[in-house]
């Protein structure tokens, strides 16, 4: 299973569309981590059959989307949030603790605009960086395990 992780588009619709169009035929799911809700709505208007999950970011004022969410994908639990409810600009302990509390295999967040990947005692952690800066992430969940790949357009 291939998942494309995107966050923080901040009106950089060109970058967002480039990423989506590059991967829409080779990916099973897109996860949008917030801060650009209107941008992502534009993608969905053009590609209504796109499979996606999403949460609200701190700049997605009046959003009706949740601040965090857990899903199952290919037998793995993915916990994701924009990150601001867990104060990720000041460290990752809070979001990691929350991900562990739901027994997540993968923890995803944005907000800092900095790409980050790590593996910590059974938990894969990724911040895909900011779409506005041309950054995103790819997750491959295969029988042999999980692979996190930060990307640039």
Image (spheres, rainbow, N blue to C red):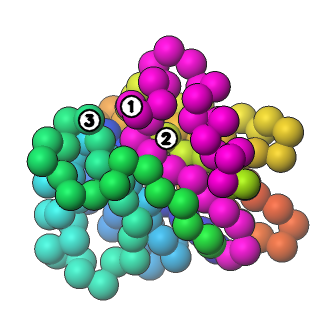
Residue 98 visible in the shown view: yes
Residue position marked by numbered label 1 in the rendering: 84
Q: Nearer the N terminus, badge 3 or badge 2?
A: 3
From which residue to which does the magenta span run?
74-102
Circles 1 and 3 in contact, beta carbons < 8 Å: yes
Foreground label between 3 and 2: 3
Where residue 58 is drawn, which disc sits there? 3
At x 50%, y 15%, the residue is: 90
Where residue 15 is drawn, which disc sits there? none
Quote the CA–CA distance across marks 3 and 2: 12 Å
Residue position marked by numbered label 2 in the rendering: 109
At x 47%, y 57%, the residue is: 69
Helix, strand or loop at mark 3: loop
Helix, strand or loop at mark 2: strand
Return the x and y of residue 3 as percentages of the image width and height. 54, 64
| Nearer to me, 7 or 123 | 123
């Amino acid at each position: 299973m291939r998942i494309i992780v995107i966050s923080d588009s901040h009106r950089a619709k060109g970058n967002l569309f480039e990423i989506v169009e590059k991967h829409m035929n080779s990916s099973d799911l897109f996860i949008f981590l917030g801060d650009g809700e209107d941008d992502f709505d534009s993608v969905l208007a053009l590609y209504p059959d796109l499979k996606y999950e999403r949460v609200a970011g701190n700049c997605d004022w009046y959003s009706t989307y949740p601040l965090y969410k857990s899903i199952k994908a290919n037998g793995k639990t993915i916990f994701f949030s924009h990150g601001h409810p867990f104060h990720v600009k000041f460290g990752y302990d809070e979001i990691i603790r929350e991900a562990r509390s739901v027994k997540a295999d993968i923890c995803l967040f944005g907000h800092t605009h900095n790409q980050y990947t790590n593996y910590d005692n059974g938990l894969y952690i990724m911040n895909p960086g900011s779409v506005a800066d041309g950054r995103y992430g790819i997750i491959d969940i295969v029988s042999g395990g999980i692979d996190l790949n930060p990307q640039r357009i």
